[in-house]
Every structure is written in structure tokens, then in C-alpha cells.
């Protein structure tokens, strides 16, 4: 990886951040605050996820938020001098965690899409 | 008038076998218009000849007398003693090796400076002198005032942690200053130096450099400009 | 006190002395970022109970509609709001807009966060006390 690679995570962090502001506002309102205090039920979420739009939004949200969060954590870690020489292993570990989280997230959403059971 | 101020000064004697720092308090009579540097001169001349600190011009031109005053990096010669009441704690600049008392080793700071070719790179041999119009000067106007005092560097939390891994606000200001100069043609090479992982991307827009710069240079603005240049390169 | 300790003390004093908005925004942005990243994993883990059975999901999510968790929801919303608003502030700087007004941007982010949190708290009052 050449030393000019850092432009890309920096840029993606900005773009994902900008998209997340909009998507999370929708997600918070629809998913949590519109009928706040009512327990969230499996049936309710399943009904919402019947529409392809919401499935798409949730999947994009999952991927963006995992990238944004883990890249943010990476930025914080690498701001400490003790971790700086280990940039590569740290980035690799966080990358693997990210991939695993996205797969696990899709796995967790899967019952809603197929209808549970 | 009988106004006095207590200067609590960081002391470190490298020839002392134990090599342990301590704080020493001196009481100085203040007078109107007195700067912190003048108060230090008072200590040096009348109370303790062993005190070391850097200074040269006393006019905020040379950038030698930057130090930590009550936890803020400032130029001693540009700071009025009347801003402080009671006790003023004077320490060397943070994040750099201390040589003696208030004198720090600025070599890592200047190493970063040398990396960016801090001089005009001509496009070839010019056949007549380069003409600078007012518009050309306006492009680089506040940034050309930089006096290399290291206040921005030592105010920046990212620079504290890793001077070899972050080129620092001062060098970036200089890149901006030379790259925007109409006489210069070395902009591409300088951009190659600063758009790497130890360059502009490590700036977290904390604004401490801009906040503390004794010459009021909008340093963060310059760094943001370089980030955009690096993206659209 | 050794030389290293006292150098560290100077550093600490310098950061603790920061009353200017830029440093506060940076520190808050980091703190809220870490909180939100932690919450993300908690959130996915909660949802993953759906893979056991719909009933398990309903039971777990039902537990999270207790008043204590609703109050924590307000705190979470405040953290997310600040992180989002300050993020917008940073993106503005990256595009070259409003760098000279960074302090105003921080104050705006704080004020809007407080307004959002207060509105959410107002929404919450009838939810907690309304039925009781």
C-alpha cells in the first residue's frame, strides 16, 4: 500500500458521515422515536422490512456505520504514539472486525426478511 | 507603584547529577507596559544569573522566546505582564526535549521544516526580475508573516504525540505560503510531501494552532486548502 | 519528580487549560464517537436475538422499553446529535466554508444538541408518567 493511500479513508469518512446524518435521522425517527416507549416487536419490524426501500436503507446504514465507526476508532488509536508503528496490523484487525460485524448484522436481519422461524 | 508578580519558573540544570526539574519562584516589581520577557530579564539581571531562556529581537519578529505561560504557548515578548495577576507559571514549550530551564530542542521541528523545501523553486532561469503585484502578495499575505516560533506546533495535540509522524502546522503553513506564491514552481513536489499519511490527513481541525498563533495566521484554513488540493490532485 | 513526569504535567496542563471551542469540540467529538461505536455493537447484538426466535426478540426489546432505558435513549440521542452536528461542522471546513466562524459553529452544535435533547425529554414525559 503506498503512502498516499490515506486520502481514501479520509474522504470516505467524510462521505459516509454526510450520508449517515441523513439516514440516521430517518432511522431514529422511524425505528425508535415515532412511537416511543411502545416495545419494538418482531412483527412490527418485519412489516417495515417488507419494503425493499427499507431493506436497502438498513443494509447501507449497516455498512456505512460500521465503516465510519471503525475508521473513527482507528483514527483515535493512531493518534497515540505507542500505536503508530503498528498501523498495519491495527488496520487489518479493525478491517476483519468490520467485515465480521457486517456479516453478523446481515445474519441478524435475515429472519425479518424471510419471515422468522 | 508597588505592584508585584510572582514568576514560578521551571528549572532544569543538565549539569546537575540528579537531573531533576523543579520550580523556583521569583517576585518581580511590575511597571506599566512590561512584557513577560522584560520580567524574565529582571530575574536574570537582578536575582538569578543562572536562568536560561531564548530571546533575540524583543519585537515578535524572531520567534525565539515562545514558552508556556500559565498553560498556554505564547511569545514572552508579545505578552503583557498585566494580563496576569498573582502567580504566573512559566514553563518550556510542551512536547519537545528540554535542554536547560526554558530552552527546548527545536531540531525535530526544523527537521519537518526542511522536508518541504522552504524556499522559492524557480521554473528555470528568469531573464528579468519577478514582478509581484499587490494581488500576488494578497494571496499569501497573512501566511508570509510566519516567524517559525513553534507555538502552533507545540499547541497541537497531534504534534505532541508524534512529531516524526505528523509534519505539523508550521511546515504546512509554509507549504501554503510557497505553493501560492506566483514566483514558485515547486508546488507539486511539496504537495507530494504533505499529501502522504504523515501529512495533511493527520490534522483534526482542532484550531489550536490558529487560536494561539502570535501572528494571527489562519493556519487551519491553509491546511484545509492543502487537503482540498491533495484530494483533487 | 522525574523529567518525563514533569514534561507530561506541562502537556496535561496545556490541554486542561483549553477553554477555546476548537479543543472542546475535538474532545467531545471523540468521546461521543467512542460511545456511539460501542452502542453500535450493542445494537447489533440486541437485534441478533431475532435469530433465536421472534419471541426471544420481543422479550429482549420489551426489556429496553423500561423507563431507565428510555432516559438512556435521550442521552444517546444527544450524543448522536452532537456528533452529527459537529461532523457537519467539520465537513463544512473541509469544503472551505466557514472556517473563520468555527467558534460560532461549535456554539450552534451545542445549542441544537440541547434543543434536540430537551424536545426528546418532553416527548418522554408522557411516555413514562402518562399511563401511571
Image (cartoon, rainbow, N blue to C red):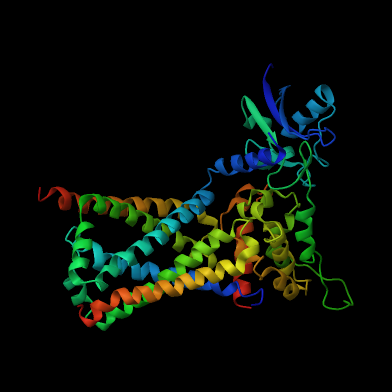
Query: Image height check: is C68 above or below A107?
Result: above
Q: Nearer the viewer, residue B124 or B45?
A: B45
The x, y position of residue B83, in whole percent, is 63, 32
- Residue at point 37%, 60% (across, down): C39
- Residue at point 46%, 70% (across, down): A97
Q: Is residue B35 visible?
A: no
Q: Nearer the viewer, residue A46 or A103?
A: A103
Left or right: residue A114 compared with residue B228: left
Left or right: residue B96 compared with residue A92: right
- Residue at point 22%, 67% (across, down): C57
Quadrant of residue A91 in the image?
bottom right
**Quadrant for the C terminus of chain B in the image:** bottom right
The x, y position of residue A2, in whole percent, is 66, 77
**Quadrant for the N terminus of chain B in the image:** top right
Q: Nearer the viewer, residue C122 or B187?
A: C122
Query: Image height check: is C6 above or below A24?
Result: above
Query: Image height check: is B187 above or below B55?
Result: below
> Total of numbered circles in the picture?
0
Q: Is residue B123 visible?
A: yes
The x, y position of residue C95, in whole percent, is 53, 68
Q: Residue furthest top?
A: B2
The x, y position of residue B144, in whole percent, is 73, 58
Query: Image height check: is B227 above or below C123?
Result: below
Amino acid at each position: 500500500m503506498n503512502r498516499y493511500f490515506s486520502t481514501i479513508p479520509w474522504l470516505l469518512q467524510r462521505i459516509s458521515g454526510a450520508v449517515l446524518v441523513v439516514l440516521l435521522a430517518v432511522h431514529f425517527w422511524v425505528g425508535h422515536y415515532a412511537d416511543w416507549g411502545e416495545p419494538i416487536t418482531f412483527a412490527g419490524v418485519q412489516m417495515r422490512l417488507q419494503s425493499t426501500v427499507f431493506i436497502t436503507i438498513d443494509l447501507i446504514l449497516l455498512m456505512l456505520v460500521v465503516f465510519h465507526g471503525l475508521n473513527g476508532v482507528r483514527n483515535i488509536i493512531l493518534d497515540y504514539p505507542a500505536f503508530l508503528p503498528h498501523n498495519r496490523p491495527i488496520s487489518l484487525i479493525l478491517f476483519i472486525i468490520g467485515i465480521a460485524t457486517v456479516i453478523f448484522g446481515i445474519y441478524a436481519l435475515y429472519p425479518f426478511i424471510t419471515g422468522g422461524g | 507603584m508597588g505592584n508585584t508578580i510572582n514568576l514560578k519558573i521551571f528549572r532544569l540544570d543538565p549539569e546537575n547529577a540528579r537531573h531533576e526539574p523543579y520550580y523556583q519562584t521569583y517576585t518581580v516589581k511590575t511597571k506599566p507596559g512590561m512584557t513577560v520577557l522584560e520580567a524574565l530579564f529582571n530575574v536574570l539581571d537582578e536575582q538569578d544569573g543562572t536562568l536560561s531562556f531564548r530571546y533575540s529581537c524583543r519585537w515578535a519578529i524572531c520567534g525565539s522566546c515562545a514558552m508556556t505561560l500559565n498553560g498556554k504557548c505564547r511569545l514572552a515578548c508579545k505578552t503583557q505582564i498585566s494580563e496576569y495577576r498573582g502567580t504566573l507559571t512559566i514553563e518550556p514549550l510542551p512536547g519537545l526535549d528540554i535542554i536547560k530551564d526554558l530552552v527546548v530542542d527545536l531540531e525535530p521541528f526544523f527537521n519537518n521544516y526542511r522536508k518541504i523545501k522552504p524556499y522559492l523553486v524557480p521554473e528555470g532561469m528568469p531573464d528579468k526580475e519577478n514582478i509581484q503585484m499587490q494581488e500576488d502578495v494578497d494571496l499569501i499575505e497573512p501566511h508570509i508573516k510566519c516567524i517559525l516560533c513553534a507555538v502552533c506546533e507545540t499547541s497541537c495535540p497531534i504534534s505532541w504525540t508524534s512529531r516524526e509522524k505528523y509534519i505539523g502546522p508550521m511546515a504546512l503553513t509554509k507549504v501554503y505560503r510557497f505553493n501560492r506564491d506566483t514566483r514558485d514552481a515547486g508546488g507539486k513536489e511539496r504537495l507530494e510531501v504533505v499529501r502522504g499519511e504523515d501529512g495533511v490527513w493527520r490534522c483534526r481541525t482542532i484550531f489550536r494552532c490558529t487560536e494561539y498563533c502570535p501572528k494571527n495566521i489562519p493556519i487551519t484554513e491553509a491546511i484545509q486548502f492543502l487537503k482540498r488540493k491533495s484530494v483533487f490532485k | 519528580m522525574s523529567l518525563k513526569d514533569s514534561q507530561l504535567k506541562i502537556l496535561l496542563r496545556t490541554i486542561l487549560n483549553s477553554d477555546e471551542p476548537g479543543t472542546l469540540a475535538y474532545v467531545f467529538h471523540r468521546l461521543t464517537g467512542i460511545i456511539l461505536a460501542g452502542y453500535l455493537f450493542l445494537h447489533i447484538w440486541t437485534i441478533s436475538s431475532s435469530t433465536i426466535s421472534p419471541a426471544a426478540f420481543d422479550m429482549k426489546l420489551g426489556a429496553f422499553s423500561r423507563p431507565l432505558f428510555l432516559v438512556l435513549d435521550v442521552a444517546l440521542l444527544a450524543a448522536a446529535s452532537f456528533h452529527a452536528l459537529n461532523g457537519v461542522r467539520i465537513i463544512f471546513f473541509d469544503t472551505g466554508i466557514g472556517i473563520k466562524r468555527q467558534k460560532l459553529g461549535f456554539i450552534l452544535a451545542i445549542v441544537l444538541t440541547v434543543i434536540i435533547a430537551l424536545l426528546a425529554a418532553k416527548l418522554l414525559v408522557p411516555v413514562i408518567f402518562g399511563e401511571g
